[in-house]
Amino acid sequence: MDISSRGFLGREEKKLPGVRLAVVQVADPDKACEFYKSQFDLEVVRRDLDGSILLSDGTVRLTLTRQKTLDRGGIQYFGIQVDNLPELRQRLIDGGVEVLPVEGAADQIRIRDPEGNQVVISE
């Protein structure tokens, strides 16, 4: 099975479809929102009546919600790509976030958000 698609303007190189939305269940959307805004420069796009908050960097959207949509295990962690990993690493440390290495990947770090969700960050 090939899930790739044609490149820009029908060129023949293949690329994977881009993930554009991640939904993360959290106990406190406001607290998680402040974390993602301050550490990753995401901006609030919308706040819903149920307390859910939609954030975005202009390309990828992150929804923080109290709602549980699955009754089983799902995503175990997600990744964020940044332009300047050393700068972000220092900002996280300065913000009191524990920054851990990713075993076997010197160009990646691992953190947990305020809800304990694991996030892997790479440049």
Image (cartoon, rainbow, N blue to C red):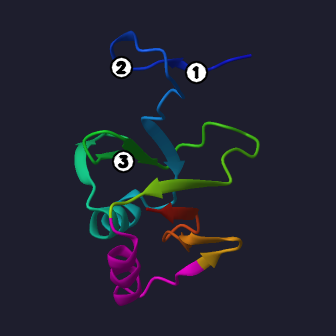
Whether 87 is among the magenta residues is: yes
Q: Is residue 29 left or right of residue 24?
A: left
- Label 1 vs label 3, nearer the camera: 1
| Residue at the image position 40 percent from the left and 57 percent from the top | 29
The reply to whether callout 1 and callout 3 are in contact (CB within 8 Å) is no
Disc 1: which residue: 4
| Element under disc 1 | loop
Which of 45/5 is in front?
5
Q: CA distance from mark 1 to mark 3?
A: 35 Å
**Numbered range of the magenta stretch:** 84-100
First in sequence: mark 3 vs mark 2: 2
- For the residues marked 3 and 2, what is the alpha-carbon distance in whole angstroms? 37 Å
Tell me the distance, in whole angstroms, between the alpha carbons under discs 2 and 1: 13 Å
Query: Residue reaching furthest top?
Result: 10
Q: Is residue 109 above or below residue 44?
A: below
In the picture of the structure, the residue carrying the numbered disc 2 is: 8
Q: Which mark is residue 51?
A: 3
Q: Position of residue 114 (x, y in %)?
A: 48, 71
* Residue 89 locus on image (x, y percent): 41, 79
47 up-or-down from 96: above or below: above
Left or right: where 97 falls relative to 103: left
Q: What residue is at 48 percent from the left and 35 percent from the top?
A: 19
The amino acid sitting under disc 3 is Gly
What kind of element bears circle 2? helix
Q: Is residue 89 magenta?
A: yes
Residue 59 in the image: above or below residue 92: above
Classify mark 3: residues with Cα within 10 Å, few (<14), some (14-19) or many (20+): some
Three-letter code for the amino acid on which mark 2 is drawn: Phe
Where residue 102 appears, as percent x and y from the top left, is: 64, 72
